[in-house]
Image (cartoon, helix red, strand yellow):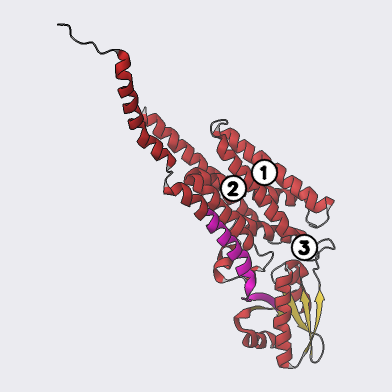
Amino acid sequence: METPVVSAPDRKPATAATSELSTEPNRAARRRPPVRAWLQPALTALVVVAAFVGCYVGLQRDPQPHRIPIAVAAPGLPDRMHQALGDSVDVHPATGAAAARHLLERHDVVAALTTDGPGRLRLETAGAVGMSTTSAVKTLVGAYAHGAGERVVTEDVVPLTHYDTRGLAGFYMAFGVTLAGFVLGSNTLGLVGLLRLRHRFWLLAGASAAIGTVATIIAGPVLGAVPAPVVPLALTLTLLAAAAAFATKLFGTYLGPVGIPVATLVLLTAGNATSGATIGADLLPAAARAVSALLPPGAAVRAVTDLSYFHGAHTAGPVITLTLWAVGAGALVGLRHRLMRRRGAAAL
Protein backbone atom coordinates (compact mmCIF):
# COMPACT_ATOMS: atom_id res chain seq x y z
CA MET A 1 0.00 0.00 0.00
CA GLU A 2 1.51 3.31 -1.07
CA THR A 3 1.73 6.19 1.30
CA PRO A 4 -0.24 9.16 0.01
CA VAL A 5 2.00 11.99 -1.06
CA VAL A 6 0.90 15.54 -0.40
CA SER A 7 1.95 17.78 -3.20
CA ALA A 8 3.43 21.23 -2.74
CA PRO A 9 0.40 23.01 -4.17
CA ASP A 10 -1.74 21.39 -1.45
CA ARG A 11 0.39 23.11 1.24
CA LYS A 12 0.49 26.63 -0.26
CA PRO A 13 -2.99 27.77 0.73
CA ALA A 14 -2.35 26.95 4.37
CA THR A 15 1.00 28.76 4.31
CA ALA A 16 -0.49 31.88 2.71
CA ALA A 17 -3.33 31.99 5.19
CA THR A 18 -0.92 31.66 8.09
CA SER A 19 1.24 34.49 6.69
CA GLU A 20 -1.75 36.80 6.32
CA LEU A 21 -2.84 36.10 9.89
CA SER A 22 0.66 36.77 11.24
CA THR A 23 1.03 40.11 9.44
CA GLU A 24 -2.47 41.38 10.21
CA PRO A 25 -1.57 42.70 13.72
CA ASN A 26 1.46 44.54 12.31
CA ARG A 27 -0.71 46.21 9.67
CA ALA A 28 -3.23 47.18 12.31
CA ALA A 29 -0.47 48.61 14.45
CA ARG A 30 0.81 50.65 11.54
CA ARG A 31 -2.68 51.98 10.91
CA ARG A 32 -2.92 53.22 14.51
CA PRO A 33 -0.13 55.77 15.21
CA PRO A 34 0.76 56.42 18.85
CA VAL A 35 -1.15 59.11 20.67
CA ARG A 36 2.08 61.09 21.10
CA ALA A 37 2.38 61.54 17.35
CA TRP A 38 -0.93 63.42 17.41
CA LEU A 39 -0.53 65.35 20.64
CA GLN A 40 3.05 66.64 20.50
CA PRO A 41 2.75 68.84 17.37
CA ALA A 42 -0.65 70.18 18.40
CA LEU A 43 0.36 70.92 22.00
CA THR A 44 3.62 72.50 20.88
CA ALA A 45 1.78 74.82 18.49
CA LEU A 46 -0.72 75.77 21.21
CA VAL A 47 2.05 76.55 23.69
CA VAL A 48 3.86 78.72 21.14
CA VAL A 49 0.77 80.72 20.16
CA ALA A 50 -0.32 81.15 23.79
CA ALA A 51 3.14 82.35 24.79
CA PHE A 52 3.48 84.68 21.80
CA VAL A 53 0.09 86.34 22.22
CA GLY A 54 0.38 86.37 26.01
CA CYS A 55 3.79 88.05 25.94
CA TYR A 56 3.22 90.66 23.25
CA VAL A 57 -0.36 91.54 24.15
CA GLY A 58 -0.11 90.98 27.88
CA LEU A 59 2.98 93.12 28.43
CA GLN A 60 1.39 96.07 26.61
CA ARG A 61 -1.98 95.71 28.32
CA ASP A 62 -1.20 97.73 31.46
CA PRO A 63 2.44 98.92 31.66
CA GLN A 64 3.36 100.30 35.06
CA PRO A 65 6.41 102.52 35.74
CA HIS A 66 8.92 101.09 38.19
CA ARG A 67 11.87 103.17 39.37
CA ILE A 68 12.28 105.14 36.15
CA PRO A 69 15.62 106.96 36.57
CA ILE A 70 15.29 110.78 36.52
CA ALA A 71 18.05 113.29 37.28
CA VAL A 72 16.78 116.17 39.42
CA ALA A 73 18.70 119.41 39.97
CA ALA A 74 16.79 121.71 42.29
CA PRO A 75 16.94 122.30 46.07
CA GLY A 76 14.47 120.07 47.91
CA LEU A 77 12.86 118.81 44.70
CA PRO A 78 14.28 115.24 44.82
CA ASP A 79 12.70 114.57 48.23
CA ARG A 80 9.37 116.10 47.23
CA MET A 81 9.23 114.04 44.03
CA HIS A 82 10.09 110.85 45.84
CA GLN A 83 7.36 111.48 48.40
CA ALA A 84 4.80 112.26 45.71
CA LEU A 85 5.65 109.52 43.18
CA GLY A 86 7.10 106.77 45.37
CA ASP A 87 8.76 103.83 43.59
CA SER A 88 7.54 104.97 40.21
CA VAL A 89 10.71 107.00 39.84
CA ASP A 90 14.34 106.60 40.87
CA VAL A 91 15.51 110.12 41.64
CA HIS A 92 19.17 110.92 40.92
CA PRO A 93 20.11 114.24 42.57
CA ALA A 94 22.39 116.40 40.38
CA THR A 95 24.46 119.44 41.27
CA GLY A 96 23.03 121.55 38.48
CA ALA A 97 21.25 121.62 35.14
CA ALA A 98 24.44 120.85 33.21
CA ALA A 99 25.20 117.82 35.39
CA ALA A 100 21.63 116.54 35.02
CA ARG A 101 21.79 116.86 31.25
CA HIS A 102 25.17 115.07 31.22
CA LEU A 103 23.58 112.11 33.01
CA LEU A 104 20.83 112.11 30.40
CA GLU A 105 23.23 112.26 27.47
CA ARG A 106 25.18 109.30 28.92
CA HIS A 107 21.95 107.28 29.28
CA ASP A 108 22.43 107.04 33.05
CA VAL A 109 18.89 108.44 33.35
CA VAL A 110 15.99 108.83 30.94
CA ALA A 111 15.08 112.42 31.85
CA ALA A 112 16.45 115.49 33.61
CA LEU A 113 14.28 117.83 35.70
CA THR A 114 15.35 121.32 36.78
CA THR A 115 13.70 124.57 37.78
CA ASP A 116 12.98 127.19 35.11
CA GLY A 117 11.98 130.18 37.14
CA PRO A 118 9.32 130.64 39.85
CA GLY A 119 6.54 128.05 39.54
CA ARG A 120 8.09 126.48 36.45
CA LEU A 121 9.91 123.18 35.91
CA ARG A 122 12.03 122.24 32.92
CA LEU A 123 11.87 118.59 31.84
CA GLU A 124 14.51 117.39 29.40
CA THR A 125 13.79 113.99 27.86
CA ALA A 126 15.53 111.57 25.49
CA GLY A 127 13.15 110.42 22.79
CA ALA A 128 15.76 107.84 21.86
CA VAL A 129 14.88 105.75 24.92
CA GLY A 130 11.47 104.99 23.42
CA MET A 131 8.00 106.48 23.24
CA SER A 132 6.57 104.40 26.10
CA THR A 133 9.23 105.47 28.59
CA THR A 134 9.16 109.11 27.52
CA SER A 135 5.37 109.23 27.77
CA ALA A 136 5.48 107.68 31.22
CA VAL A 137 8.01 110.25 32.42
CA LYS A 138 5.93 113.15 31.08
CA THR A 139 2.83 111.75 32.78
CA LEU A 140 4.57 111.29 36.13
CA VAL A 141 6.24 114.71 36.15
CA GLY A 142 3.01 116.32 34.94
CA ALA A 143 1.08 114.72 37.80
CA TYR A 144 3.63 115.96 40.32
CA ALA A 145 3.63 119.48 38.83
CA HIS A 146 -0.17 119.61 38.87
CA GLY A 147 -0.27 118.68 42.52
CA ALA A 148 2.44 121.23 43.36
CA GLY A 149 0.83 123.99 41.32
CA GLU A 150 3.74 124.31 38.90
CA ARG A 151 4.02 124.37 35.13
CA VAL A 152 6.30 122.07 33.10
CA VAL A 153 8.24 123.00 29.97
CA THR A 154 9.45 119.93 28.04
CA GLU A 155 12.34 119.57 25.57
CA ASP A 156 13.62 116.49 23.76
CA VAL A 157 17.42 116.79 23.88
CA VAL A 158 18.22 113.34 22.43
CA PRO A 159 15.63 112.94 19.66
CA LEU A 160 15.16 109.99 17.37
CA THR A 161 16.45 110.13 13.82
CA HIS A 162 14.15 111.48 11.13
CA TYR A 163 13.72 108.01 9.59
CA ASP A 164 12.72 106.32 12.86
CA THR A 165 10.15 108.62 14.40
CA ARG A 166 8.53 105.84 16.46
CA GLY A 167 11.79 104.36 17.73
CA LEU A 168 11.08 100.84 16.48
CA ALA A 169 13.88 100.43 13.93
CA GLY A 170 16.20 98.87 16.50
CA PHE A 171 13.51 96.43 17.58
CA TYR A 172 12.68 95.29 14.06
CA MET A 173 16.35 94.98 13.19
CA ALA A 174 17.05 92.90 16.30
CA PHE A 175 13.98 90.76 15.62
CA GLY A 176 15.06 90.13 12.02
CA VAL A 177 18.62 89.23 12.99
CA THR A 178 17.40 86.93 15.78
CA LEU A 179 15.01 85.24 13.36
CA ALA A 180 17.77 84.77 10.79
CA GLY A 181 20.06 83.27 13.44
CA PHE A 182 17.27 80.97 14.58
CA VAL A 183 16.68 79.74 11.01
CA LEU A 184 20.44 79.26 10.53
CA GLY A 185 20.80 77.23 13.72
CA SER A 186 17.75 75.05 13.03
CA ASN A 187 18.96 74.27 9.50
CA THR A 188 22.36 73.12 10.71
CA LEU A 189 20.66 70.52 12.90
CA GLY A 190 19.94 68.58 9.70
CA LEU A 191 23.58 68.65 8.59
CA VAL A 192 24.90 66.30 11.27
CA GLY A 193 25.53 63.49 8.77
CA LEU A 194 26.91 65.80 6.08
CA LEU A 195 29.33 68.15 7.85
CA ARG A 196 31.75 67.65 10.70
CA LEU A 197 31.10 69.59 13.88
CA ARG A 198 33.91 72.09 13.26
CA HIS A 199 32.59 72.70 9.74
CA ARG A 200 29.12 73.35 11.14
CA PHE A 201 30.63 75.79 13.62
CA TRP A 202 32.46 77.61 10.83
CA LEU A 203 29.19 77.76 8.90
CA LEU A 204 27.37 79.26 11.89
CA ALA A 205 30.11 81.81 12.55
CA GLY A 206 30.53 82.86 8.92
CA ALA A 207 26.81 83.10 8.19
CA SER A 208 26.28 85.08 11.42
CA ALA A 209 28.87 87.62 10.28
CA ALA A 210 27.09 87.89 6.93
CA ILE A 211 23.70 88.34 8.64
CA GLY A 212 25.02 91.08 10.91
CA THR A 213 26.71 92.90 8.05
CA VAL A 214 23.67 92.80 5.76
CA ALA A 215 21.34 94.03 8.53
CA THR A 216 23.75 96.85 9.37
CA ILE A 217 24.07 98.05 5.79
CA ILE A 218 20.32 98.00 5.16
CA ALA A 219 19.22 99.68 8.42
CA GLY A 220 22.14 102.11 8.56
CA PRO A 221 23.64 103.52 5.34
CA VAL A 222 20.80 102.45 3.03
CA LEU A 223 17.69 103.38 5.04
CA GLY A 224 19.24 105.75 7.57
CA ALA A 225 16.99 104.46 10.35
CA VAL A 226 19.78 103.37 12.73
CA PRO A 227 22.48 106.06 13.10
CA ALA A 228 25.01 103.86 14.90
CA PRO A 229 28.61 103.60 13.62
CA VAL A 230 28.75 100.87 10.99
CA VAL A 231 31.58 98.68 12.35
CA PRO A 232 30.43 98.51 16.02
CA LEU A 233 26.84 97.94 14.88
CA ALA A 234 27.88 95.15 12.51
CA LEU A 235 29.89 93.45 15.28
CA THR A 236 26.95 93.71 17.68
CA LEU A 237 24.49 92.23 15.19
CA THR A 238 26.97 89.50 14.30
CA LEU A 239 27.09 88.53 17.96
CA LEU A 240 23.28 88.58 18.11
CA ALA A 241 22.98 86.29 15.07
CA ALA A 242 25.64 83.96 16.49
CA ALA A 243 23.94 83.89 19.89
CA ALA A 244 20.60 82.96 18.30
CA ALA A 245 22.15 80.39 15.94
CA PHE A 246 24.30 78.60 18.52
CA ALA A 247 21.52 78.71 21.13
CA THR A 248 19.07 77.15 18.66
CA LYS A 249 21.59 74.43 17.85
CA LEU A 250 22.14 73.89 21.57
CA PHE A 251 18.43 73.38 22.27
CA GLY A 252 18.04 71.09 19.26
CA THR A 253 21.11 69.05 20.18
CA TYR A 254 20.11 68.43 23.78
CA LEU A 255 16.30 68.34 23.53
CA GLY A 256 15.75 66.76 20.10
CA PRO A 257 12.51 67.65 18.28
CA VAL A 258 11.30 69.74 21.22
CA GLY A 259 14.41 71.92 21.00
CA ILE A 260 13.13 74.06 18.11
CA PRO A 261 9.90 75.10 19.90
CA VAL A 262 11.93 75.82 23.04
CA ALA A 263 14.28 78.04 21.03
CA THR A 264 11.23 79.76 19.54
CA LEU A 265 9.85 80.52 23.00
CA VAL A 266 13.16 81.71 24.48
CA LEU A 267 14.55 83.74 21.58
CA LEU A 268 11.70 84.87 19.37
CA THR A 269 8.89 85.13 21.91
CA ALA A 270 10.19 85.96 25.39
CA GLY A 271 13.41 87.53 24.12
CA ASN A 272 11.84 89.99 21.72
CA ALA A 273 8.74 90.73 23.81
CA THR A 274 10.87 91.71 26.83
CA SER A 275 13.61 93.47 24.86
CA GLY A 276 12.47 96.90 26.07
CA ALA A 277 11.96 98.30 22.57
CA THR A 278 8.17 98.30 22.23
CA ILE A 279 7.59 98.65 25.99
CA GLY A 280 10.37 100.28 27.99
CA ALA A 281 12.17 97.98 30.41
CA ASP A 282 11.19 100.21 33.34
CA LEU A 283 7.51 99.62 32.51
CA LEU A 284 7.66 95.83 32.34
CA PRO A 285 6.43 93.48 35.09
CA ALA A 286 9.04 92.25 37.54
CA ALA A 287 9.59 88.86 35.88
CA ALA A 288 10.01 90.43 32.43
CA ARG A 289 12.41 93.05 33.79
CA ALA A 290 14.52 90.30 35.35
CA VAL A 291 15.17 88.53 32.04
CA SER A 292 15.03 91.52 29.69
CA ALA A 293 18.75 92.32 29.58
CA LEU A 294 19.82 88.68 29.93
CA LEU A 295 18.29 87.39 26.68
CA PRO A 296 20.01 88.11 23.34
CA PRO A 297 17.32 90.39 21.81
CA GLY A 298 17.12 92.59 24.90
CA ALA A 299 20.91 92.87 25.11
CA ALA A 300 21.10 93.75 21.41
CA VAL A 301 18.38 96.44 21.60
CA ARG A 302 20.24 98.12 24.45
CA ALA A 303 23.53 98.01 22.57
CA VAL A 304 21.97 99.39 19.38
CA THR A 305 20.30 102.24 21.28
CA ASP A 306 23.50 103.19 23.09
CA LEU A 307 25.57 103.05 19.90
CA SER A 308 23.01 105.09 17.97
CA TYR A 309 22.23 107.89 20.42
CA PHE A 310 24.44 107.76 23.53
CA HIS A 311 27.97 107.34 22.12
CA GLY A 312 28.14 103.69 23.21
CA ALA A 313 28.18 104.66 26.89
CA HIS A 314 26.79 101.35 28.19
CA THR A 315 27.51 98.96 25.33
CA ALA A 316 30.01 96.73 27.16
CA GLY A 317 27.40 94.87 29.24
CA PRO A 318 25.13 93.89 26.33
CA VAL A 319 28.11 92.86 24.19
CA ILE A 320 29.39 90.61 26.98
CA THR A 321 25.92 89.06 27.31
CA LEU A 322 25.75 88.29 23.58
CA THR A 323 29.26 86.86 23.60
CA LEU A 324 28.47 84.57 26.54
CA TRP A 325 25.38 83.25 24.75
CA ALA A 326 27.26 82.49 21.54
CA VAL A 327 30.42 81.06 23.10
CA GLY A 328 28.63 79.25 25.92
CA ALA A 329 26.13 77.56 23.60
CA GLY A 330 28.92 76.53 21.21
CA ALA A 331 30.95 75.08 24.08
CA LEU A 332 28.01 73.03 25.35
CA VAL A 333 27.32 71.67 21.86
CA GLY A 334 30.98 70.69 21.55
CA LEU A 335 30.88 69.03 24.98
CA ARG A 336 27.86 66.97 23.95
CA HIS A 337 29.66 65.88 20.78
CA ARG A 338 32.74 64.73 22.71
CA LEU A 339 30.65 62.83 25.26
CA MET A 340 28.77 60.99 22.50
CA ARG A 341 32.04 60.05 20.81
CA ARG A 342 33.45 58.69 24.06
CA ARG A 343 30.33 56.62 24.67
CA GLY A 344 30.50 55.26 21.14
CA ALA A 345 34.18 54.33 21.57
CA ALA A 346 33.48 52.66 24.93
CA ALA A 347 30.68 50.58 23.40
CA LEU A 348 32.98 49.05 20.77
Taking 98 as reference, is 168 above or below it?
above
Disc assigned to residue 112: none
Taking 4 as reference, is 233 above or below it?
below
Q: Amino acid at mark 1?
A: Ser
The answer to if 49 sits in the magenta stretch is: yes
Lower position in the chain sequence, tag 2 or tag 1: 1
Identify which residue, 59 or 334, lies in the foreground: 59
Chain part drawn in magenta:
44-71
Question: Dot 2 corresponds to which residue?
Answer: 326
Taking 250 as reference, is 174 above or below it?
below
Question: Dot 1 corresponds to which residue?
Answer: 208
- The answer to which quarter of the image holds residue 339 is top left
- The answer to which quarter of the image holds residue 193 is top right
Q: Amino acid at mark 2?
A: Ala
Please identify the dominant SS of the magenta region.
Answer: helix
Question: Dot 3 corresponds to which residue?
Answer: 309
Q: Are marks 2 and 1 in contact (CB under 8 Å)?
A: yes
Q: Position of residue 59 (x, y in %)?
A: 61, 69
Label 1's element?
Answer: helix
For marks 2 and 1, give the CA distance. 10 Å
The answer to if 138 sits in the magenta stretch is: no
Lower position in the chain sequence, tag 3 or tag 1: 1
Q: Are marks 3 and 1 in contact (CB under 8 Å)?
A: no
- The answer to which quarter of the image holds residue 27 is top left
Label 2's element?
Answer: helix
